[in-house]
Image (tube, helix red, strand yellow):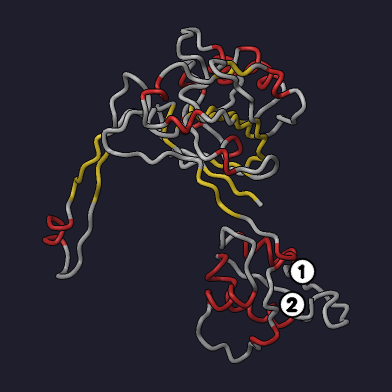
Amino acid sequence: MWWLAPLASLLRVVARPVFGHEIAATHPPVGVGGGAGRADRGQTTLTEATLQKQFARTTRSVSFSVREWVRARHPGPLEAFDWDTLPDRPLGGGDVSRLVDLSHVIEHGMTTYPGLPGPVISVHLSYEASRSHYEPGTEFQIGRIDMVANTGTYVDAPAHRFAGQADLADLPLERLADLPICLVRPTLSHGDRAIGPIIFDAVEVKGHAVLVHTGWATRWGTEAYMSHNAFLTAEAASLLAERGATLVGIDSLNIDDIDDGRRPAHTALLAAGIPIVEHLCGLDALPAAGGRFFAVPVMVKGMATFPVRAFAIVD
């Protein structure tokens, strides 16, 4: 912790461009160099935990050394800063976080669901056509995509099932981002597609993104993906709604049996205001416990489903 005092001096320099506001600290901080320290009005005592939290906001990973972070942000000389006082070790004892992509790539003409048209991806403004609008050597491309909302990995808002209920623009971020993960991996025997409530008996679902790893995503892009899908039973969906799941996702063609026109899982979950994410992939890369889930669509008024870039942050 002896290195926090010189780092505090640097933070006065880098705080505004990095974090968008000034970060001040006592110098020396409380408990550093034996000084008692005194926080002035509006100032905050720096601790290793504080630094880790602030740095993590700008790096997608909390595994980096302070030295590496400072050099990345300020490669030029800083006369007032003694680089040799920085510890060449990760903050927070070396904890490592990583990003896990849980989304399918959207490609021209691909099929997400039987009977729905694939996306048409084209160019609205080409590099060549743009050149007449700019100075020599400057060019841009603007793409265009025509697609149904249920394309790739997407989220369902309550309005997908119930007219007049919350659409994409109404979904709060608290329902979509930075959610603790509850991951279940049901064992499906050959020909068994139904996932009942018993799989959720021993797990905490309240306030969690409940992700159901069926393995169906391995069939993506084949005819086998498009029928006889793994799904949640009506009883399982009702239990998740009753126990307060925040979001429910599945790596299958549909959270319901597509041969069941009642769509009981959609009905139970969306009636409770619980967003549904379908066509996930990569759930095999998640640990059995832990991690945070994100699946945020654009805010489109009047639309109830839309693709997301679903991902997880895991230790």
Q: Identify the residue under disc 1.
A: 47
Q: Is residue 150 above or below residue 313?
A: above
Residue shown at 53%/88% (left/top)?
Answer: 77
What is the spatial separation of the Cα atoms under label 1 and label 2, in whole angstroms?
A: 7 Å
Residue shown at 45%/38% (left/top)?
Answer: 308
| Near-viewer residue (180 or 199) | 199
| Near-viewer residue (35 or 237) | 237
Q: Are marks 1 and 2 in contact (CB under 8 Å)?
A: yes
What amino acid is found at the position of numbered circle 1 in the picture? Thr
Residue shown at 65%/16% (left/top)?
Answer: 196
* In this rendering, position of residue 305 left or right of residue 249: left
For mark 1, give the secondary structure: loop
Q: Give the tally of numbered discs.
A: 2
Q: Identify the residue under disc 2.
A: 4
| Near-viewer residue (124 or 90) | 90
Residue shown at 44%/34% (left/top)?
Answer: 153
Question: x%, y% of residue 199?
Answer: 69, 23
Q: Quadrant of residue 67?
A: bottom right
Tell me which numbered mark, 1 or 2, is placed earlier along the sequence: 2
The crowd level at tag 2 (other Cα within 10 Å; few <14, some 14-19, many 20+) is: many
What amino acid is found at the position of numbered circle 2 in the picture? Leu
Q: Please tell me the numbered disc located at residue 194.
A: none
Question: x%, y% of residue 237?
Answer: 62, 18
Q: Quadrant of residue 223?
A: top left
Question: x%, y% of residue 186?
Answer: 64, 26
Residue furthest to the front: 190
The crowd level at tag 1 (other Cα within 10 Å; few <14, some 14-19, many 20+) is: some
